[in-house]
Amino acid sequence: MSLSPAVSFLVVLIIGVLAGLIFDRVAGPNWFKRQITGAMPSMVTSALVGVAGAFVGFHLAESLRLAGGAALIGAVIGAAAVLFAWRSVR
């Protein structure tokens, strides 16, 4: 599966945003805290961290020359790894 660079960019961007939003929903603050402090800054930050992790994972998989759609799987794994690391440091 060979995607054009523009399509790869958009797919990795979408993977990162979705991973960040899902992670924020699952591991984020509870409902009551979101009502008091607001959820938007946390969601945006999680989405941006997810995008960064997705690009790191994608390019790491690409540099290892993994076959097929493994680079997209690398994007998912990279986003999850960076989000978990970010949450544990924060």
Image: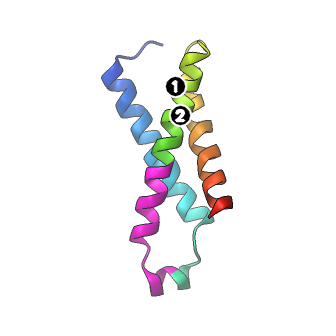
Q: Quadrant of residue 30?
A: bottom right
Please determine whether, in this image, residue 77 is positioned above or below residue 42: above
Residue 61 rendering spot, x and y as whole percentages: 59, 22
Identify the residue under disc 2.
56
Circle 2 crowding by C-alpha within 10 Å: few under 14, some 14–19, many from 20: many
SS for tag 2? helix
Q: Mostly what secondary structure, the magenta segment?
A: helix
The residue positioned farthest toward the right in the image shown:
88
- In the depicted structure, whether residue 41 falls above or below residue 15: below
- Residue labelled with disc 1: 59
Q: Is residue 24 left or right of residue 39?
A: right
Magenta stretch holds residue 27: no
Does residue 69 appear in the picture of this structure? no
Q: Which mark is residue 4?
A: none
Q: Give the residue furthest to the left.
A: 6
Where the C terminus falls, by quadrant?
Answer: bottom right
Give SS at disc 1: helix
**Residue 24 at x, y percent in the picture:** 54, 62
Position in image of residue 21 (x %, y %): 48, 56
Q: Are marks 1 and 2 in contact (CB under 8 Å)?
A: yes
Decide which of 36, 82 is in the foreground and name it: 82
Q: Looking at the picture, how far across and down is residue 36, in whole percent?
A: 46, 87
Specify the amino acid type for callout 1: His
Could you give the CA–CA distance between mark 1 and mark 2, rounded to whole angstroms? 5 Å
Instruction: Identify which amino acid the numbered label 2 is placed on.
Output: Val
What residue is at 61 percent from the left and 55 percent from the top? 86
Residue at 59% x, 29% y is 74
Q: Is residue 36 magenta?
A: yes
For label 1, the crowd category at 10 Å Cα-Cα, with few meaning under 14, some 14 to 19 and many 20 or more, is some
Q: Find the magenta span and give its range.
A: 34-49
